[in-house]
Amino acid sequence: MITFPLSISANWQCSSSVTGLSLLEQEWLFEPHSLTAKLKNNARSFSVKVLSEQAFSLTKEQQQLLGSSASKALNREVLLLCDNIPMVYAQSWLPNNESQALLHNMGERPLGDVIFQHSALTRNNIEIARFGSSHALQLLVAQLNLPAQPMLGRRSVFSINDYHFLVCEVFLPGAYLYS
């Protein structure tokens, strides 16, 4: 049985120190714009399946990444599906902040559809991680009946004005970047 939130602990590396990526992997991992829009452009249908959305205590590492002393955040876990095939497992940490309550009531709406509409949106450097065959995410892969294989993920901190939030996206087996 899977318990949410899933751990995405990994050896996160700044993009400049990651080697051995194919051009296709680089294209997807370093996409500077909305991953949601990129996925939509490559599929006939796109949908979001919410796996979990709950209050969560931020770890010291997450607080440091966010440059925040906030202790609580909304943890949102979703699958991004293209033509009903799970392509991306995404997790976001949205610190409690009344000015950004809109991001706390997303339902099945993609986060990317909302945040990339803000002219004040900025993103810090993209970090990359590899998730091996023994990583906890493989439980989700098995539940989705996808082949067990190493996966790649990316994370970055976004800011809208003074509000900072962390987003992590892991490309599931069969995702476009493995074509």
Image (cartoon, rainbow, N blue to C red):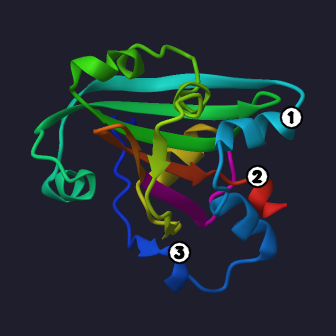
> Of the residues under marks 3 and 1, which one precedes in the sequence?
3
Residue 98, horizontal then vertical, whole percent: 23, 17
Q: Residues within 10 Å of mark 3 (few under 14, many from 20)?
A: some
Question: Does the magenta portion include 151?
Answer: yes
Q: Tell me if mark 1 has few (under 14), some (14-19) or many (20+) residues whose alpha carbon lies within 10 angstroms of its own.
A: few
Q: Is residue 103 magenta?
A: no
Q: Amino acid at mark 1?
A: Ala
Is there any visible trace of residue 108 in the rendered image? yes
Tell me if 112 is positioned left or right of 25 in this view.
left
Q: Pick the residue in front: 39 or 33.
A: 33
71 sits left or right of 51 in the view: left
Q: Which residue is mark 2?
A: 174
Camera-nearest label, 3 or 1: 3
What kind of element bears circle 2?
A: loop
Q: Amino acid at mark 3?
A: Ser
Mark 2 or mark 3, earlier in chain = 3
Could you tell me residue 88's position as x and y percent?
62, 44
Residue 17 location, x and y as percent? 50, 85
Measured along the vertical axis of the image, is residue 12 above or below residue 165?
below
Task: Identify residue type, mark 2.
Answer: Gly
Q: Residue at x 76, y 77 (%)?
A: 22
Q: Nearer the viewer, mark 2 or mark 3?
A: 3
Q: CA distance from mark 2 to mark 3?
A: 23 Å
What distance separates the C-alpha of mark 3 from that of mark 1? 27 Å
Residue 15's disc number: 3
Magenta range is 145-156
